[in-house]
Amino acid sequence: SAPDPSSKQGKDKDNAVNQGKDNKDNKDNKSKAAVNTQSTQPDTTVRDKKKQFKQGNVILSRGPIQIGDVTVKEWQRMPKQLLHEFTQRQKRPRAIYERVRCANYDKFAIRCIMPDIKGKKENDITITTVESFDSQRDAEEHAALLVLHYFQKSLPLERKLPEPYASAW
């Protein structure tokens, strides 16, 4: 005797229904596991923040950060960062920072070179800090501030700069 095809179809339907229930249970378990991991681990990457946003969670501001001796609020920018954004907007090559000899060897002075758009060395703009600084980072930031002042005198950039550089603007 031949097997009844209708009984085979019935078994297949029962198996499909059972698998569907198993899949739903697995999804519930996965979502519970995801909720548990979110509450215990801080989200720090951009991907995690996007995932948080899609789930409807509120993303708080990062708050002020400390860069060397300077406290930078989230809406403020350092002079080197503003100069980099300026060069990208103007489609210019990036600024080059070179250390210059000082009378005192434990101090720093920086020469900032803004390469010419067309690549001509004789048209490069070179600005050097007159005073020397305790750290190389501080000297580079002040050199970038001088270059920004050369290119964008009329813009009120002191609003975007953190305090030691805002007063120097």
Image: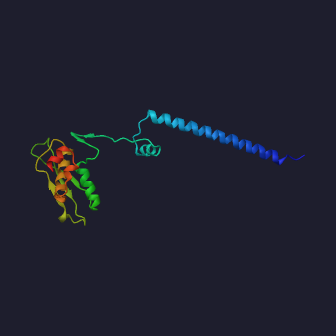
Residue at the right extreme, as displayed: 1
Position of residue 3 relative to residue 88, above or below, is above
Q: How many marks?
A: 0
In this picture the colour scheme is rainbow
- Front residue of 134 and 85: 85
- The picture places residue 10, in percent across and down from the top left corner, at 78, 44
15 with respect to 56 (left or right): right
- The picture places residue 99, in percent across and down from the top left corner, at 18, 49
- Front residue of 144 and 107: 144
- The picture places residue 27, in percent across and down from the top left corner, at 58, 40
20 with respect to 165 (left or right): right
Residue at the left extreme, as displayed: 103
Residue 106, located in which quarter of the rendered image? top left
Position of residue 3 relative to residue 156, above or below, is above
- The picture places residue 90, in percent across and down from the top left corner, at 27, 62
Q: Residue at x 41, y 36 (%)?
A: 42
Q: Residue at x 82, y 47 (%)?
A: 6
Position of residue 119 relative to residue 142, above or below, is below
